[in-house]
Amino acid sequence: MDIDAVVGDVGSFDPELLQLPELSPFALKASPQIAEDLYAQWLSLPQTGRLVKSLIDDATAGIPINALGNSSSANAAGSNSLPSMFQAGSTPPLSPRSSPGSPRFSKLKTSPSSLRSPLKVVSEPVREAIPQFYFQNGRPPPKELQEHCLSRINDLFGGHMDGLQLHEFKLVTKELCKLPTFFSSAIFKKIDTSCSGIVTRDAFVRYWVDGNMLTMDTATQIFKILKQSDSNYLTQVDFKPILLELVATHPGLEFLHGTPEFQERYAETVIYRIFYYINRSGNGRLTLRELKRGNLIAAMQHADEEEDINKVLRYFSYEHFYVIYCKFWELDTDHDFLIDKENLIRYGNHALTYRIVDRVFSQIPRKFTSKVEGKMGYEDFVYFMLSEEDKSCEPSLEYWFKCIDLDGNGVLTPNELQFFYEEQLHRMECMAQEPVLFEDILCQIVDMIAPEREDYLTLADLKGCKLSGNVFNILFNLNKFIAFESRDPFLIRQEREDPTLTEWDRFAHREYIRLSMEEDGENASNGSVEVWDESLEAPF
């Protein structure tokens, strides 16, 4: 074996074995010809010849060969490092190569066997158990909460070994379930599935504690109590039992006990108002998400705590029901509980235009529930009246937007606005009012709403402006349009005195006073008048 034989093996030589600190091994691998030339030049050096001869002698003598070229012979004793082809100082130094103990060196020199099992080098990671975060039937109560609840249950059921009857169950509903007392019947019937008239301690524990009702939020509890077992939504029928119990037990509604028909109408009106504001999809199916997003739960708790039901302005006020029902009764001249176009055109002292009434009866904003052609039922009228008297709320804006959007493309163009304003302009001329040209009205609307694009209005534009309700008044309600143009100081004073009241709250209060005075006037003609309390008008 000689040096020439070694040179003949250049083509099979790995360039990285050259170990040249002056050149990157990656550059040598990218240009194999350079590696071959350097290798051949390296072999021609005198030092290389002595090193190769020393290695051959060691191999002949049977001495193990050191891969780094460190020979045991005396000739190689001073040649532990491989000779370099570059003169010192001829090139700038490169980055220092990784030391044998560095991560980079280990990565480049690691054997295939060690690469296949890197986890052997590091310790096994400790497995951390992920706690259960989904419970099909609700999260179980903590042990401390469960023990406290069971203790309270034992106190309430302690003197009733056979169980509690319905009239005794209200304390459980109020103190233990933390729900309004008019939910007592609904909870009682959920537990007493056999209709025995008794709820035992064990039955209540199975339903409330074992059923994980204890850890649910109030909205979810009410949702599960009211809904049918095979449904994932609430319908109007589901609210009927708790409202009838409210009428029967609330001190502010005792005067209705002698008039069952008005108890029924009151309950229906409250339900219609709930679905008008809460059921935003308008499909008659109230979901848990809609229930949580609304303010119904707070209104229920307020109604349970407040003795004067008229102070619960959200949904439950009897005065509000009285105004809605009397308005409907005034328009329903034949009292068949249905009204037609001619009846509705008289609403608000003929405030509305024929064109907007036609759109309402075309059922564009909402399908009628009356099932009678050309007739509007009581529920349909409740939706209409709430939309007409409070155009600042989102359900009202959506209602009237659909009416004005003639082609249903989701935008209101100047042509559509002009179509409805034409009749309004004609009515102003007939009433000797100074007419306002549509061009001026259009500029006023654009300045008022500040839409994203001035060539049309979107529903998002209207919802983003507090004055958007006035746009609809300009288009089809003459009385409110004139009041807006004149900036009625009486209305401005109302808004400033109590900004928490909505347009509907103020309207309902004014109308209730008017209707009460009319009724007192009728009683006076019969000799049974009561003295009117002027303090009722104090905040308005």
Image (tube, rainbow, N blue to C red):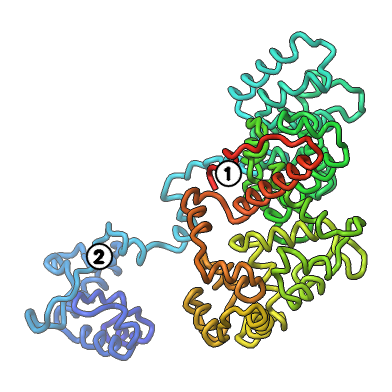
Q: CA distance from mark 2 to mark 1?
A: 91 Å
Q: Residues within 10 Å of mark 2 (few under 14, many from 20)?
A: few
The amino acid at mark 1 is Glu
Q: Dividing the picture into quarters, in which one does residue 303 lie?
A: top right
Residue that label 1 marks: 537
Residue 509 shows which numbered tag? none
Q: Please name whichever residue, 67 or 485, is drawn nearer the observer in this view of the structure.
A: 485
Query: For the point 57% across and 38% down, which residue is it?
Result: 535
Closer to the chain start, of discs 2 and 1, is 2
Residue that label 2 marks: 98
Q: Please name whichever residue, 115 or 205, is drawn nearer the observer in this view of the structure.
A: 205
Give the percent coordinates (x, y) of residue 191.
82, 29
The amino acid at mark 2 is Ser
Residue farthest along the top direction in this orientation: 159
Give the percent coordinates (x, y) of residue 518.
73, 48
Give the percent coordinates (x, y) of residue 144.
58, 22
Decide if residue 113 is in sight here. yes
**The N terminus - image quarter:** bottom left
| In the depicted structure, whether residue 169 falls above or below residue 360 | above
Decide if residue 227 is in sight here. no
| In the depicted structure, whether residue 410 falls above or below residue 111 | below
Lateral position of residue 221 relative to residue 57, left or right: right
Q: Please name whichever residue, 278 or 506, is drawn nearer the observer in this view of the structure.
A: 506
